[in-house]
Amino acid sequence: MFTPKRHSRDDPDLGRILNLIRENFAYMEGRIDPPSSMHRLTREALAKACETGEVWSLGPPPRACVVLTFRPDALYIGKLATDKTLRGQGLAHHLIAIAEDRARALGVPRLELQTRVELIENHRAFERMGFVKTGETAHEGYDRPTSITMQRPVTP
């Protein structure tokens, strides 16, 4: 059984969460352009995310994680990662349920995330969790879409 945990700025698990993200985003290397922002992610950035939003994991130790950022119209889901040896066991669904609970508690009407255009398998996984494509964006310096935005309404 995996227990959900909300992390704080000084939580020693933040280093493990950073490693979990790096290890489980590594498969994107060479598949996406531009490279993942995870290359710029630091423990300090995760600590700040604990203050400006929320960082959750399932463990212990952390085996899946997500970073939640509050916006007036949506709760943004970022850096969702699941240990590759545990994929298919519902951990991402569990983290999305936590995000929905948090959005509901805050009165936010929808969940939102972005996924890279090239990662078709991620698009399908998020569609299975009730997300729909709502737009496309391009990273600075690109004249083509590099990410798609997906949203899901928060159920009452």
Image (cartoon, grey):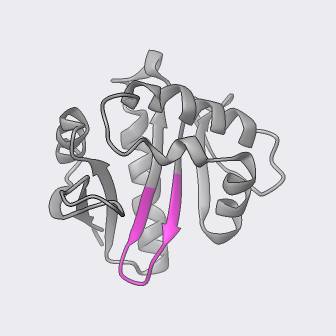
What's the magenta bit mostly, secondary-structure-wise?
A: strand
Quarter of the image that includes the N terminus: top right
Q: Residue at x 59, y 47 (%)?
A: 40
Q: Residue at x 24, y 37 (%)?
A: 119
Provide residue 116's location: percent of width, then percent of height. Answer: 28, 46
Q: Choose top left, top right, bottom left or bottom right for residue 135.
A: bottom left
Residue at the farthest top position:
85
Query: Does residue 18 appear left or right of residue 47 in this picture?
Result: left
Provide residue 125's location: percent of width, then percent of height. Answer: 23, 38
From the viewer's perspective, is residue 28 above or below residue 140? above
Q: Residue at x 27, y 61 (%)?
A: 138
Residue situated in front as seen by the camera: 38 or 57 = 38
Q: Does the magenta run of residues contain 23?
A: no
Q: Can the viewer see residue 1?
A: no
From the viewer's perspective, is residue 57 above or below residue 110? above
Quarter of the image that includes the C terminus: bottom left
Query: Does residue 56 appear left or right of residue 45 in this picture?
Result: left
Query: Does residue 45 appear left or right of residue 111 in this picture?
Result: right
Residue situated in front as seen by the camera: 114 or 38 = 38
Count of residue discs:
0
Q: Choose top left, top right, bottom left or bottom right for residue 77.
A: bottom left
Provide residue 76's location: percent of width, then percent of height. Answer: 42, 64
Q: Can the viewer see residue 81?
A: yes
Provide residue 111's location: percent of width, then percent of height. Answer: 34, 65
Q: Residue at x 36, y 41 (%)?
A: 93
In magenta, the rendered stretch is: 67-77
Residue situated in front as seen by the camera: 143 or 86 = 143
